[in-house]
Amino acid sequence: MDVANVQILKGAEIADDTILWRYMNMTKLVDLLSTSQLAMPLASMMEDPYERDVGLASAAQRWHDQKSRGAPSYWLAADQDMHLKTAARLRSATYITCWNALDTESAAMWKIYGESGGIAIQTTWSGLRDSLVSEKHFYGGKVIYLDYNKDALPTTTHTDDYFYKRSSFSFEHEVRLISHAPDCERFLSGKDEKIRWPKVDKINIDLGQLAPSVYVAPQLPEWVRDAVQALTLKFGHGWEINQSTLYTPREPNYWPEALNARGEN
């Protein structure tokens, strides 16, 4: 079994025991269980149109640098056109899976995913990294959030750019794994513009190594938790299945009992 090569980018380092969450609908959970594969969509399928965009501050930095070297006034428009074309090419040749590095459940993420039959799986960075079974090369790490109008991206490669997002998304505390499609460089250079790749890349994973805990959205009834438990057992996984209690009211004697359980009463 080939364990994937995951390169951690400088500045995006992440501890092995970092808790990760992946929020999804029930369909994606069934796909994960039935295929033992992690779905990685192309960046072009992401909702954020600024994926791999460097922003205004970076453009200003590039322009001032080129202007000091005597670049003509039309250079800026030409540079923007080239950047937009390169960014679009990269988005159609780069696969991403996104996770959330949080110690606890996220009310915001449940709002996004929970009402449509939401499920969250919880693992660790080492659990995710070591579960990948692939000969492909991956890049991973924490996403850094910046104000694109004020902060220039300190990146040196096309890959680096995918580990920066606008500060409006900082609530996600995102951790990413990305991989570039085969022959990506030929496509970017324009040597072969007809190459097309599947919209989703399926990566084999060892679900035993991933070893997640599963949480059912707080809005859903408890029978859904029972159904998820039966489903995971059917596929041979005795995962811990939890009903989220995020919005469950406290019992009348909650404080005394909870403090007593902690030895503080």
Image: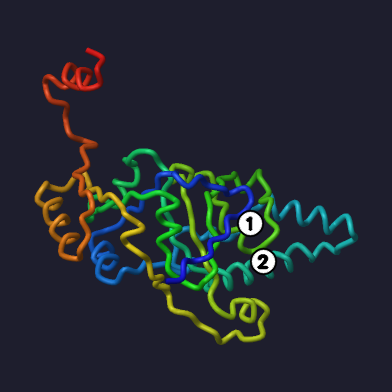
Disc 2 from disc 1: Cα separation: 9 Å
Q: How crowded is mark 2: few (under 14 residues within 10 Å), some or many (20 or more)?
A: some
Look at the image and tell me in which quarter the N terminus lies. Answer: bottom left
- Residue 83's mark? 2
Residue type indicated by callout 2: His
Instruction: State yes or no: discs 2 and 1 in contact (Cβ < 8 Å).
Output: yes
The residue closer to the viewer here, 31 or 249, is 31
Taking the spot 25% from the left edge, 51% from the top edge, the residue there is 214
Residue 220 x %, y % = 16, 48
Taking the spot 24% from the left edge, 37% from the top edge, the residue there is 246
Residue 37 x %, y % = 35, 69
Taking the spot 61% from the left edge, 62% from the top edge, the residue there is 159
Q: Please report whichever mark, 2 or 1, sits nearer to the chain's N-terminal start.
A: 1
The residue closer to the viewer here, 103 or 150, is 103
Residue type indicated by callout 1: Val
What SS does tag 2 mark?
helix
* Mark 1 lies on residue: 54
Outermost residue on the front side: it is 1
Image: 79 above or below 60: below
Look at the image and tell me in which quarter the C terminus lies. Answer: top left
Q: How crowded is mark 1: few (under 14 residues within 10 Å), some or many (20 or more)?
A: many
- Is 133 on the left-hand or right-hand side of 154? left
